[in-house]
Amino acid sequence: MWNRKRHEDESWEAGNGDATLVLAALRHKEGALEMIFSVETWKDPAAWGLFLADLARHVSEAYEQAHGMPAEQTMIELLRVFHAELLHPTDQAHGHLHRNSGPVVQN
């Protein structure tokens, strides 16, 4: 799990000389979520589902460590809002795909 302390203590460079790939970059700017990612990371869109599931588990564990909220309780709340947002979005995603020039930019 990534946290500031670990990032300060350890290099993100792969130990065996392999390249490291950043999957996504997100930021909250002026009340909006902005993200950059590459849909070329995985050819199978199901892999993004695995990524999101892993991210949810890491967030749940981080909340337990940082705030004492049980990981299971965090996961229940996270999934409740995730499903609600998919069914009834509070905002529409917009952005554009940059072909052959790097990642997707969404804001």
Image: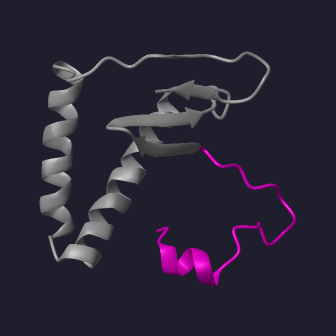
Pinpoint residue 46: horizontal percent, then vertical percent.
48, 30
Using the image, determine if residue 55 lies above or below residue 66.
Answer: above
What residue range appears in magenta?
A: 1-23
Verify whether residue 12 appears in magenta.
yes
- Residue ID at (65%, 79%): 10
Residue at point 14%, 29% (across, down): 84
Q: In this view, does 59 lie above or below 30?
A: below
Observer-nearest of 86 and 28? 28
The colour scheme used to paint the residues is: one colour
Q: Residue 95 vs residue 57: left or right?
A: right
Kindly identify the residue that appears in the image at 63 percent across and 32 percent down: 42
**Image: 27 above or below 60:** above
Residue 59 location (% of width, % of height): 33, 59
> Which residue ends up furthest to the right in the rendered image?
17
Total marks placed: 0
Residue 101 is drawn in which quadrant? top right
Judge whether residue 53 is colored magenta.
no
Please, which residue is most extreme toward the bottom here? 9
Residue ID at (69%, 68%): 12
Residue nearest the observer in this picture, 50 or 107: 107
Residue 5 percent across, percent down from the top left: 51, 81
Q: In this view, does 5 lie to the left or right of 92?
A: right
